[in-house]
Amino acid sequence: SCSRFTTTTTRRRTMTHVGGARLLRADVNARAHIRGTSVGKGARRGARCVAAARPESVLLAVDLDGLLPPEIDGDLEGLQEEAGAVFDEQGYVSHFGSVTEEAEAIASGAAVVDRSDWGLVRASGPGALRALQVLANDDGVKLSAPGSGFEMTLPSGDVAQVYAQGEGFILVTPPRATANTLDVIGSVMPSHEFMQLNENCALLTVCGPKLVEFLRSSGLVGVMDAPVGSHQVFGFENRPVVACHTPEYGVSGLNLIVDEGIAGQVWATITRAGVVPTGNDASNAALVAQKRLLA
């Protein structure tokens, strides 16, 4: 049964405070799993995405200090408000004042989009492969090697991103396809082997032909040098950031699956490096043009 899964319709506010150095850590084999946890009554639910990195994880010779301002204080929604965000009825950003300029940033500059309304689903277990095959209505679908990924067309006609993790995967689905995706997976796998991560994580996408210029001082550019679908797990403030090479916008791009507790810091770090904050209006138009999203 998938009765315990609901589509998130409003944003949650999470106060955060950052100071001091931040070291970016990557699992060289890009093999980690994310699980959701919850905190006590009255506190924010699903406070953390937890990544279990392999022992051979190594520290990169780079950190985020080259991008990061001395201090960031605020949650993701609050920081977006400060940047002039206009929100839709569900609490997600429509635009930051000029859809035209934001579309330009995607096409010819560098943009960051908060796509936390998109579904994030993790599945792990013997039924994971069969779940993908049923979702794709194609028995020929195979899980790729851990740390790699691929695109898959859903029954709705929308395109999902699949990030392989050994016996399982993380799936990024368009908002309208999430509920059906969970139902389909639930018809194949027991409920303890899959979960929706949206209670715990944000999805931030950075994209644009000039993206490398802005992220050169971080380890994230290395993921973009790898094949499309490749992903690695980085550490930021002792929380995981899964960085995934995405082709969705037809330009250089990374999907960042971020623990919600640090989503504000990560978003602010990127925008203060000069990447243009962009809303769903420009983002969705670009995805429709690239045939990754139905109009």
Image: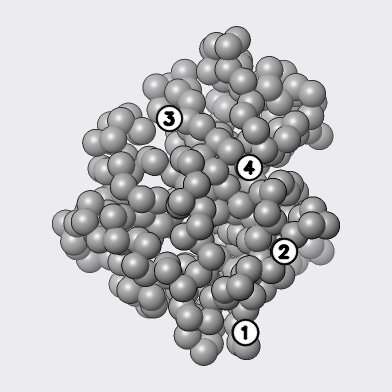
- Can see residue 78? no
For disc 1, the marked residue is 21
Sooner in the amino-acid sequence: mark 2 or mark 4: 2
For discs 2 and 1, the disc positioned in front in the rendered view:
2
**Left or right: where 243 falls relative to 31:** left
Q: Is residue 254 left or right of residue 96?
A: right
x 42%, y 69%: residue: 216
Q: Nearer the viewer, residue 131 or 66?
A: 66
**Sequence-wise first label, 3 or 4:** 4
Q: Give the residue at mark 3.
A: 159
Vertical side of 48 occupied by 199: above or below? above
- Which residue is label 2 attached to? 58
> Quick one: label 3 or label 2, which is nearer the N terminus?
2
Foreground: 216 or 184? 216
Above-or-below relation of 30 to 154: below
Q: Could you tell me which residue is drawn at 43 percent across and 30 percent down?
A: 159
Quarter occupied by residue 289: top left
* Rendered-image quadrant of the N terminus: top right
